[in-house]
Amino acid sequence: MQQNNQDAVLLELLKIGSTDAFTTVYNKYHRMLMMLAVDMLKDDDKAEDLLQEFFIDFWQKKLFLKIDANYQNRDSASIMKCYLYASVRNRCLNKITREKKFTSIIPDEAFLPRDPLESKEIYYQVNTALKRKVPPKSSTAFRLRHYDQKSHKEIAEEMNTSIQTVKNQIGTAVKILRGHFSLAHL
């Protein structure tokens, strides 16, 4: 029960903008969340990047406001701990899903990377094709979506265009890349 009280106090301090409370939350939960992310992503660097992005959003976008300090689950676990765990788990699942979609532009399973060197080669080939074959706006939209993992809405705002235009541009890029890679590997 003491953890719940401490987290309730931390939550109230976060709501009034306490950077010390944020630092305490970070120090208290970073290790547990890192273990979760590494377990799911199977990559220490990706896990650390994901956690950094999460904690930046947690503070800057005030995600902590979504936590209800009065709620406790059945086993009296901290609601903050549960929220942080679920948030990072969902981000990991989203990242895994996006990576699977990105690799799906390669038409044949035989061309999927088996080791890091192959992965770098495919990345290089995709980048080269994006530069040489894909129109600039489509290339930019594709990179923002699949490399920077931004939402269609975020891309539309960044490119000062509509969400539908972003979807069309990404579709154009994917279509050209699929055609390029199917011809390249005949």
Image (spheres, rainbow, N blue to C red):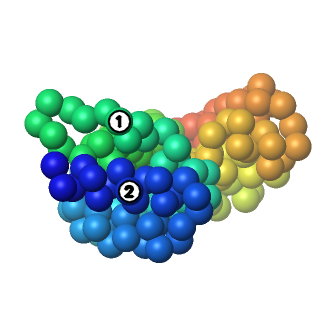
User: What secondary structure is marked by label 2?
Assistant: helix
The one of 120 and 168 positioned closer to us in this rendering: 168
Q: Work out whether residue 176 can be spotted.
A: no
Residue that appears at 33% across and 72% down: 27
Gap between marks 1 and 2, in whole Å? 11 Å
User: What secondary structure is marked by label 1?
Assistant: loop
Residue that appears at 43% across and 72% down: 23
Q: Residue furthest left?
A: 75
- On screen, residue 62 versus residue 52, left or right, reads right
Residue on which the image places disc 1:
70
In percent of width and height, residue 72 lies at 25, 35
The one of 141 and 58 positioned closer to us in this rendering: 58
In percent of width and height, residue 145 lies at 62, 45
Compared with 96, 26 (above or below) is below
- On screen, residue 123 versus residue 148, left or right, reads left
Identity, as a three-letter code, of the amino acid under mark 1: Asn
Q: Work out whether residue 83 can be spotted.
A: yes
The one of 35 and 182 positioned closer to us in this rendering: 35
- Dot 2 crowding, Cα within 10 Å, few <14, some 14–19, many 20+: some
- Total numbered labels: 2
Residue on which the image places disc 2:
9
Residue that appears at 54% across and 67% down: 18
In percent of width and height, residue 77 lies at 18, 44
Quick one: label 1 or label 2, which is nearer the N terminus? 2
- Dot 1 crowding, Cα within 10 Å, few <14, some 14–19, many 20+: few
